Image (tube, coloured by chain):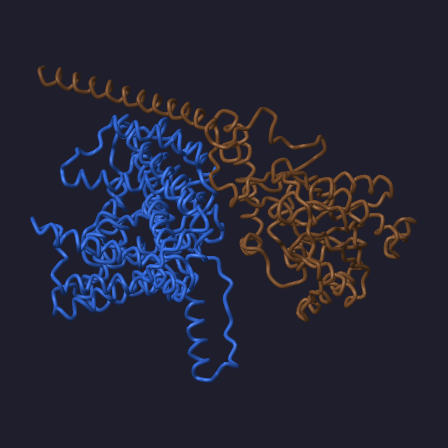
Chain colours: A brown, B blue
Amino acid sequence: MHSSTSNSKSSGARARRQRACLLIFLGTFALACAFSRFLQSCVPAKHAWRIEPGELAPPTEEPTFLAYRGGTVDHYVYYADIGGAVSSARSADILILGNSHAGLGLDAAELRRFRTDTGLRIYNLCFNLNERAEFARVVMQRHALRPEVALVNADYFFSEGMSAAAVKITREGQWRAVMNWAEKIAGHAVSRRLHRWLPYFDWAARVTGDGLVYRSATDGAWLVVKGPHDDRPLQRPALDDAQPSPEEIRYAERFQNDLAAHGTALVLTWVPYPGGSQHRAEILAEALGVPFLRGAESGLRLRDYSHLTPHSAATFTRALLEQLITLDQIKPLLAGDTP
Amino acid sequence: MSFTSFAFALLFLSVLGCRLTFGRDKRARSYLAFILGVSVVFYAWHIPPYLCILILSCLLDYVVALALPRQRPGSSRAKLILCLSILGNMGVLGFFKYANFALGSIDRLLQVAGLSSVDLPRLDLILPMGISFYTFQSMSYTIDVYRGKLDPIRSFWRFFLYVSFFPQLVAGPIVRARDFLYQIDRRRKIRAGVMLEGSFLVIRGFFLKMVVADNVAIAVDETWVAACSPDASSLLSMIVLCLFSCQIFADFAGYSSIARGAAYTMGFRVPVNFNCPYIASTFKEFWTRWHISLSTWLRDYLYFSLGGNRKSRLRTYVNLMIVMLLGGLWHGAATTFVIWGAMHGAALVVERMLGLERLHQRPGRGLIKFAWALVVQCTVLATWAFFRAQWTGEGMTLIRRILSFDFAPLNDSMPLVALIFVVPIVAMHARAWLADRSHLPPPGACEKAVWAGLMLAGILTTYGKDNAFIYFQF
């Protein structure tokens, strides 16, 4: 009798202690969260942000998909053909290929206006992570993308190799691409809700890149919701005499031949930024015997070290598209004379 | 599947739901079947066809273990059957992990011999997740049966559950069959204390991984190349190396803590894998605190099999070197891992030669203990340079830069800021050091509740960039 009483007493005490521990845990957690909110006011906004209601939502009414959030997402979307983005690219007359300089340097509204005015379907298939031709080739082959014209931003585009993310995606295949995409989407959905209440201390935003980019499912345009927003002048080198390497020319010829086999004409351009060379791209176009479109060349400004501001992107794109419709490769399309 | 994924969160919540409903009596067959199913999903999530390799590896050891008791102990037939298991497991491991390393080595040899025209192929293989862990786990079972320490299990599904039990499947701890199999049939009710302890371990693991390891990784990845350059400041090289030593500890100890906590809430015990290794005062003690399940595996199944320290002194030293070299190679098919293992092996040999391996257990000799502990920790730190390096020269340069004592100021404040994330590791080790010496009591439930609250808030506000666990690649 005595033993059973002491047992029940000790189990009761244990239960009380456990309840107390749970309360201590919850109390400490609540205090720590409150302290983090206070700390947020002491830290520069770029290092500790909190999402205001409505922020980080897709920027337009039309169909979009998450393209970049703390790492690439659109690589998965295009590789695994998720959400119908590829079907729009498949029906495009003009496919734009290149890296993030072209992705951000080609204005979504101008591309859309071009489509409305000319009736030509233009699709921006540029990738971030300084992706080169190899991954674009994989996506085009995988999904049988055969546009009439491929407009390529010839910024070190024609070379072997892919970004580390693209290598991983192509090695691991469809299943992993879909799973990784799903993880990214879930992470984005959770963080959008979580950080309305709690701050996020992004101490290394400079390195990790705190950008958030969506893409239009209709024309692949890049829609930047959160990213660098400087406004600095674009300073181009006084002497630009860089030359493409023989390997680059050989690779570009192979790429051109592959496109030609499917009836796609190649056109080159170069979206300006301080580290690159327009001269190099022009020589490359000359070597391949394809047109080169300069776009706008002056009065451009940068949002960070290498990407055009939205206003400059609009200026550049407008000029580029004006030059594009004068090309012999485009004229039959405008006349509705497509194969 | 990674522990730091939403898929795992859903999977684990479903397991908890089952544990609290039809898994209250852990012996329930439906609960065991559910855990087995979840383990299969967990493994197949990575590359589904690789599930076949796991099943085949299990089948091999299951059949071999059943055949062993029919043979006379120690007979040549028994040895032959055991060899079948070892060769099968090592063959699969070798093919996926070491084939390219071997081909590369042969290629280099051919070039030295002047046969550079021979073009050896390279295999484009994705390493099956956790293969190094589950092959060792499966092999330990067969060897234990061969040694007569364990009776073979009749049910394949129970054996498969032991190998594929999802909390420890991918990166350990390497659980022994004799520590796990009996738990399958043990009846145990759900107890709040156990659930709270398991939750604490899970939160601690996520904190170590998502806050410490992932944030430190940002600074290490960003500055590693600069720290390994021939003109790097000693200060930078030293800070980056310290950061990496914390990163790898937090990454791996974090995984092990989540694994233990998850298993605990499910009603299973998984052994401790890390016990504050950076307070070890001898190399021998370090290996009783770092990746304990691997070091005890190597001791029991390799070191003892080679004769351990029962033969001559020289043989003991050779055995230590062999074990550590193979331990290094187990981590990956690269010269850098071999050097890492060789350095640890040499350190253990020197320590034994000097008779310092039991120094930490002896009373007094404070100054010698302190000096040797310093040597031990500095050596351990130096070995991490090779563990992280892409090639041998990179690690060598980093060590050389530290030893040049050229303390030029840093151009980048990032590594210094990242040292904030080292504070929890230092605090954790300091607390363990004080508790080991009875200056502090072991952490009580209330203290753990406070830490858990703080760590959970840290996870939700300061999680780092999403990175795979370092030991996934092993």
Query: Height in image: B310 above or below A76?
Result: below
User: What x and y, as percent, mark residue B194?
Assistant: 27, 30
Is residue B37 at least partly visible in the picture? no
Furthest residue in direction bottom, as rendered: B114
Left or right of B413 on screen, residue A50: right
Q: Residue at x 48, y 83 (%)?
A: B115
Front position in the image: B447 or B202: B447
Furthest residue in direction right, as rendered: A335
Left or right of B294 on screen, residue B316: left
Q: Report which quarter residue A1 is drawn in.
A: top left
- Quarter occupied by the C terminus of chain B: bottom left
Left or right of A144 on screen, residue A47: left
- Quarter occupied by the N terminus of chain B: top left
Q: Residue at x 49, y 24 (%)?
A: A197
Left or right of B147 on screen, residue A197: right
User: What x and y, as percent, mark residue B323?
Assistant: 25, 63
User: What x and y, as percent, mark residue B451?
Assistant: 31, 30
Query: Height in image: B437 above or below B373?
Result: above
Q: Report which quarter residue B179 is drawn in.
A: top left
Query: Height in image: A237 above or below A1?
Result: below
Total number of numbered discs in the rendering: 0
Q: Report which quarter residue B27 is drawn in.
A: top left
Query: Height in image: B392 above or below A193?
Result: below
Is residue B39 at least partly visible in the picture? yes
